[in-house]
Image: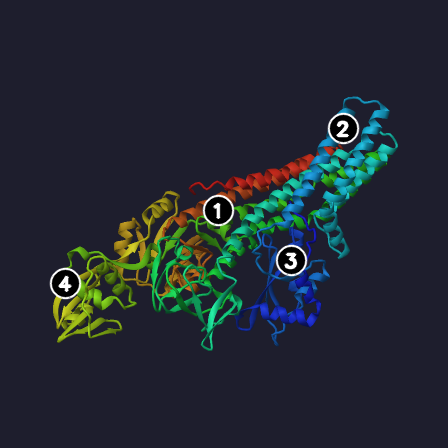
Amino acid sequence: MTCCAPIAVPSDVQSLGHPEAALEEIRLASRDLGNGTRQTDLSVPGVHCAACIAAIERTLRKLPGIEAARVNLSMRRVAVTWRTADGTPPDLIGTLRGIGYEAHLFAIERDARDPELARLVKALALAGFCAMNIMMLSVSVWAGADASSRQAFHLISALLALPALLYSGRIFYASAWSALRHGRTNMDVPISIGVSLAFALSLYDTLHNAPHAYFDAATSLLFFLLIGRTLDHVMRERARSAVAGLARLAPAGATIIRDGRPLYIPVSEIEPGAAVLVAAGERIPVDGVIDQGTSELDCSLVSGESAPRKAALGEVVHAGVMNLTGPLTVRATARADDSFLAEMVRMMEAAEGGRARYRRLADRAAALYSPVVHTLALLSFLGWLIATGDWHVSITIAIAVLIITCPCALGLAVPIVQVVAARRLFERGIMVKDGSALERLAEIDGVAFDKTGTLTLGRPTLVNADEVAPSAMRIVSAMTMGSRHPAAQAIAAAAAQRVSQVPAFDRIEEVPGLGLEGRLGDATYRLGRLGWATGQWVRDDASTAASISVLARDGELLATFVLEDRVRRDARETVDGMRRQGLTVEILSGDRAAVVEDLATKLGIRDFAAGLLPAEKAARVAAHEAAGRKALMVGDGLNDAPALSAAYVSMAPATAADIGRNAADFVFLNESLSAVGDALGISRRSRRLILQNFVLAVGYNALAVPVAVLGYVTPLVAAVAMSLSSIIVVANAMRLSPARKAA
């Protein structure tokens, strides 16, 4: 269900009434997107339906300097992108107020209370109580009560209907009046007219002791409308609660070091370069690099893995990560609005707010509703009046047409499914950046995988550790413990599990592109490329899939270390699942041919291309689209960003580079590649449910409207039929809820 009832604006927000103060507040709160473009997020509590979305977006886009305006219905949020010559924002709040929508700067509420739900439940309870009692009185009338008893029952029904219309109906009346007062219309206008006319006609008939009255129709319509509206609100709250839950992972404030003294400030005021103190048990407030201290971190938010990860000097950390054991000093590298956690929140919000193809279709149909249904009701009234000359029969049929043609089911067909789908994906550790991505993913006929960091974890592991002598392990453990190179870290991790006491080197130097060189007494040790370490320059063997490092002392070979990248969990099962569904699977990689071929053989992938530059990857993806194919690109690195942008739909792991995550439509948080299959399964089930909802909504109107126009439907039957159609659509969307394995 949809409504547009106004919601009270907090007093502290109303203080922005002065135009200059409001514009300055908007400017300070806006986010810099680069090239002079900024984004401002506004909260518009009164937006509730497709007509509201269209009115807000259309009005804002007419303002000078506005580049884009997008409404997120679940969050009641409007994201406005603007650019002006002097950096002064357009009067967004004043413009929205001019068309009947109160607005203020957006902030995710940390309060768990939901006053709107409480208001809906109270209205629903009153409408249900009145409707049931009126229905009991109506049964007595239908059973054959005499004229005096019938009129008494109708008068009692009128008294019961009055509080329902005044209290429960105000949700619709306030919305309808606000729309009409500003020269607009919405779905609540015909609902309000239908309910009011049904009550007025019934009261007229009661006073004239007519045999029929439709108080039960008016109250039952409100009751069923409020059932659907409450269900819709609860479903949207699930999406809002997910976003709010993510936002609450960031603390409200943090302690920084300024002029040598600790100072507690709001997180929003932390600038890049600030030294932030993070005590054990606190969450890291902004993205940064560890300047001082060592600790263990709970990085499940980023990687999906609950096992604590050691963190030391120089390590990159993300906002929202929990510091478990020791105090840290983190040098901020980004503002709170630009942090990894803020990006996740924005992606979750965008999941429901995308202007997808199905959604645009439903919005266009809903936008045509008010003029079409009013015209249809008027023509029905005039036609029956001309045919029968009975104004009472004519207006009764017109009321039935007004009620039964409400397109609430059509308005709910797409957004309800997308809200549930976004929630299901979020529960599986998958973030959606655009609602239309769900539609596109359901249509793919092929998948292209990057190799390093996608099919593999991008972290090499030592595969022959048990074959290396303990004495050599002690040497390499001492040499690699301070290195940030992935190969050195892999050797250090394996050595730490096998040896304890290590020698203290006099000097260790890292030679870029070659390896590590250390001085221990009179001996020089080298760990790295074979030719460099031994002094016997040879060409690297490009035919081997593994990466080889050697340890040498004064040119004498001591040990060989074989390193391989670890394949992601469930990679083989995911690839097999893609092929069983008839999808083509290929690897597009910039790595060496031998490495790519070895991985392709392990995973059973026949099509692969190695040694590709970023532009070549993008060209391969673009060629698929030119050939009429719809491919999913799954990649992670900077070199994958062009291909991710060019693909029909794209996905990246949370460990991807920032530019890779920004280019992707989906981001998955855990190490398992099963997220690809999960997302595909949920998207295809969502598409089926959306199409089913369209069929249900359109089929209902195709059957109901002619019957109502021909006079075979009373206002009561119309109210029940229309409300049940909306409830059926919501219930159908909720079938996506069980967390079963996606096909």
Give residue 140's quadrant in the image. Answer: top right
- The amino acid marked with disc number 1 is Arg
Residue 171 image offset from top left, x and y in percent: 71, 47
Q: Which element carries disc 4, helix, strand or loop?
A: helix
- The amino acid marked with disc number 4 is Ser
Question: Which of the two discs, 4 and 2, labels the residue nearer the N terminus?
Answer: 2
Instruction: Determine which residue is flagged by label 2.
Output: 138
Residue 664 image offset from top left, x and y in percent: 45, 58
C-beta proximity under 8 Å, tags 3 and 1: no
Q: Nearer the viewer, residue 743 or 265?
A: 265
Instruction: Determine which residue is flagged by label 4.
Output: 471
State how far apart marks 4 and 2 are (Cα): 94 Å
Q: Quadrant of the N terminus?
A: top right
Q: Which element carries disc 3, helix, strand or loop?
A: loop
The answer, for residue 194, to whether it is visible in the render is no
Instruction: Determine which residue is flagged by label 1.
Output: 424
State how far apart marks 2 and 1 are (Cα): 44 Å
Residue 139 image offset from top left, x and y in percent: 74, 26
The answer to whether 148 is drawn above or below residue 373 in the figure is: above
Question: Which of the two discs, 3 and 1, labels the residue nearer the N terminus?
Answer: 3
Instruction: Determine which residue is flagged by label 3.
Output: 44
State how far apart marks 3 and 1 are (Cα): 26 Å
State how far apart marks 4 and 1 are (Cα): 52 Å
Q: Residues within 10 Å of mark 3 (few under 14, many from 20)?
A: many
Numbered tag placed on residue 452 in the rendering: none
The answer, for residue 131, to whether it is visible in the render is yes
Q: Residues within 10 Å of mark 1 (few under 14, many from 20)?
A: many
Q: Which element carries disc 1, helix, strand or loop?
A: helix
Say which of marks 3 and 4 sits in front: 4
Residue shown at the point (20%, 70%) measured from the top left: 504
Residue sitting at the far front: 261
